[in-house]
Amino acid sequence: MALSTLFRPVEFDVLPGWPEDEHDLAFAAFRRCAFRAAEKPYRSGSLGVTAEAFAPAYDEARSTDQLGPREARSFFERHFVPMAVAPENGGAGFVTGFYEPIVAASPVRTDRFRVPLLFRPDDLVDVDDKNRPAGFDSYLAFGRKTAAGIVEYHDRQAIESGALDGFGLEMAWLEDKVDAFFIHVQGAARLEMMDGTTRRITYAGKTGQHFTGAGRVLADLGEIPLAEVTMQSIRRWFRERPERVDEVLWKNRSYIFFREASVDDPALGPIAAAKVPLAPGRSVAVDRLLHTFGTPFFISAATLTAFGGDGFRRLMIAQDTGSAITGAARGDLFTGSGYEAGEIAGVIRAPADFFALVPRGLVEAEGSSR
């Protein structure tokens, strides 16, 4: 598999702020991928960065304790070649942010807690080319198992109107429908239960129906200018117009189901698509059809100041994905857990330059074959 022409080799000194970054934090995130890949290798993305090519770097990472910033920088420079990533349609790349909400919840429905989060239903099945019925929408990766075969699953409006009532799928109850919706968007949350315990939930499946962001809906309705769409502006609009919440949210037909997960390290986020816990400020969600989990990306966004400082220049590790994350130079930055992380994630919408760190052995082997 040849490397995509969207990749262009550059030198490390081209990466803005590369020497000043805290490479040890990125190494810790990369090392978690190394241990996971030893259990089950990641799937290779279609842009030609094969999972097998990471073996030398993964071997060294597993056999090495946590490195200091200087040693970690040397590690990445020895094992990888930076490649500028060109967006498919020209222009610049783009980053947004995501986080892990922390919300109050109840194990049972009460007058205060009335909005359920649901376990994955037994009749939800994955759909691929092997079992896709004739005429079934090619977008849909999930369906509903019936005696007559696989059909489209209920959408958000149907589920919130009672399509799954009575099946005992309720794992917890929240106060606010908008909080539940944003947990669906983020794909995970920590629930602070009324008995003082904390439960973590994470993605377990979805209806597969088309995802439509609330911000896009509000922009299309002329309610919020697209340039001003943030999590904060969306929440403010919902607070001021509670009677229109369903009107907007039901335009997003996708609905997310959850499973419980442990909180092994409160400093880290939930275990995401790459099957490792997310590292605040060091994990990035990418298009998994194009990219390979575990790939380091140096991301430079001069106008992004939500993390502090005069811009964002940081080495991140590809450890998650998302329905809205499509394209070679598109990323979603994990900001952490809780309110402050949400305040950062909610305002991240910035053009960015992407540099993929491609295993050096793969680059040299391709060069010698040309």
Image (tube, rainbow, N blue to C red):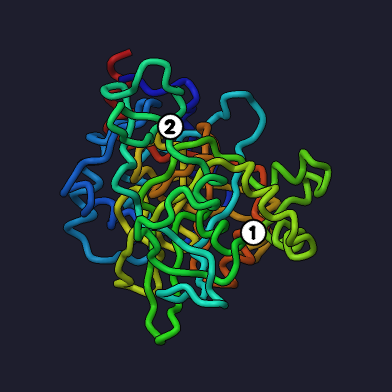
Side of 10 where 266 appears, left or right: left
- Residue 88, image x, y percentages: 57, 24
- Residue 279, image x, y percentages: 41, 62
Q: Is residue 291 above or below residue 18?
A: above
- Residue 188, image x, y percentages: 44, 60
Q: Image quadrant of residue 226?
A: top right
Q: Residue at x 45, y 61 (%)?
A: 117
Q: Secondary structure at mark 1?
A: loop
| Label 1 packing within 10 angstroms: few (<14), some (14-19), many (20+) | many
Q: Residue furthest bottom?
A: 196
Q: Is residue 199 above or below residue 186?
A: below
In what quadrant of the picture does the C terminus appear? top left
Q: Residue at x 66, y 64 (%)?
A: 309
| Camera sees residue 27 | no
Q: Which mark is residue 346?
A: 1
Residue wearing tag 2: 152
Side of 48 where 116 appears, left or right: right
Q: Image quadrant of residue 195?
A: bottom left
In this view, the mark in front (2 or 1): 2
Nearer to the camera, 107 or 101: 107
The three-letter code of the residue at mark 1 reads Gly
Q: Earlier in the sequence, mark 2 or mark 1?
A: 2
Q: Residue at x 40, y 37 (%)?
A: 288
Q: Secondary structure at mark 2?
A: loop
Q: Residue at x 38, y 59 (%)?
A: 202
Q: Residue furthest top?
A: 370
| Label 2 packing within 10 angstroms: few (<14), some (14-19), many (20+) | some
The three-letter code of the residue at mark 2 reads Glu
Q: Is residue 240 above or below residue 286?
A: below
Q: Image quadrant of residue 233?
A: bottom right
How far apart, in angstroms, are the residues tagged by discs 2 and 1?
Answer: 32 Å
- Residue 358, image x, y percentages: 37, 36
